[in-house]
Amino acid sequence: MQEKYTAYLLRIWQVEEPSGYSWRAMLENPRTHETFGFASVDALAAFLKDQWNQKETGGDLKPETIPKQT
């Protein structure tokens, strides 16, 4: 049986804003080099949860159907 998985490279950094510092994140699919940017930890978590749910329900993870996060 072939194991299905999805891998991402995670990058995180801080940006300075008038109100202080905020975290940003980016995921990159190392196979396709497609990137997904996130302006908050909540947005990153929501994206990963959606990916997880698609895996559990047997849905395909097609990058062209996943909207870019900001």
Image (cartoon, grey):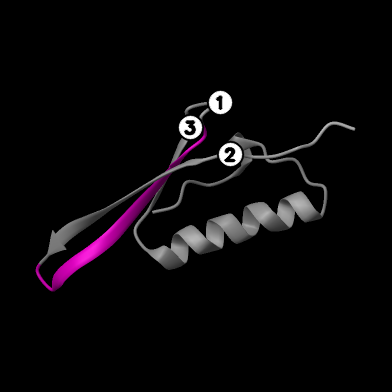
> Does residue 60 lie above or below 39 as drawn?
above
Majority secondary structure of magenta residues = strand
Q: Residue furthest left?
A: 18
The range drawn in magenta is 18-29
- Based on the picture, tell me whether residue 22 belongs to the magenta stretch: yes
59 left or right, relative to 52 = right
Tag 2–tag 1 contact (CB < 8 Å)? yes
5 and 47: which is toward the camera: 5
Q: Residue type at mark 1?
A: Arg
The residue tagged 2 is 7
Q: Is the C terminus in the top left, top right, bottom left or bottom right quadrant?
A: bottom left
Asked which quadrant contains residue 21, the reply is bottom left
Q: Residue at x 53, y 47 (%)?
A: 67
The residue tagged 1 is 31
Q: Residue furthest right?
A: 1
Q: Earlier in the sequence, mark 2 or mark 1?
A: 2
3D distance between C-alphas at marks 1 and 3 = 8 Å
Q: Of the residues tagged 1 and 3, which is closer to the observer?
A: 1
Q: Residue at x 75, y 50 (%)?
A: 55
- Per the image, label 2 sits on a secondary structure element best described as loop
Circle 3 packing at 10 Å, graded few (<14), some (14-19), many (20+), is: few
- Based on the picture, tell me whether residue 1 belongs to the magenta stretch: no
Q: Residue at x 68, y 41 (%)?
A: 61
The residue tagged 3 is 34
Tag 3–tag 2 contact (CB < 8 Å)? no
Asked which quadrant contains residue 65, the reply is top right
Q: Residue type at mark 2?
A: Ala
3D distance between C-alphas at marks 2 and 1 = 8 Å
13 left or right, relative to 42 = left
Q: Residue at x 82, y 48 (%)?
A: 58
Q: Residue furthest bottom?
A: 19
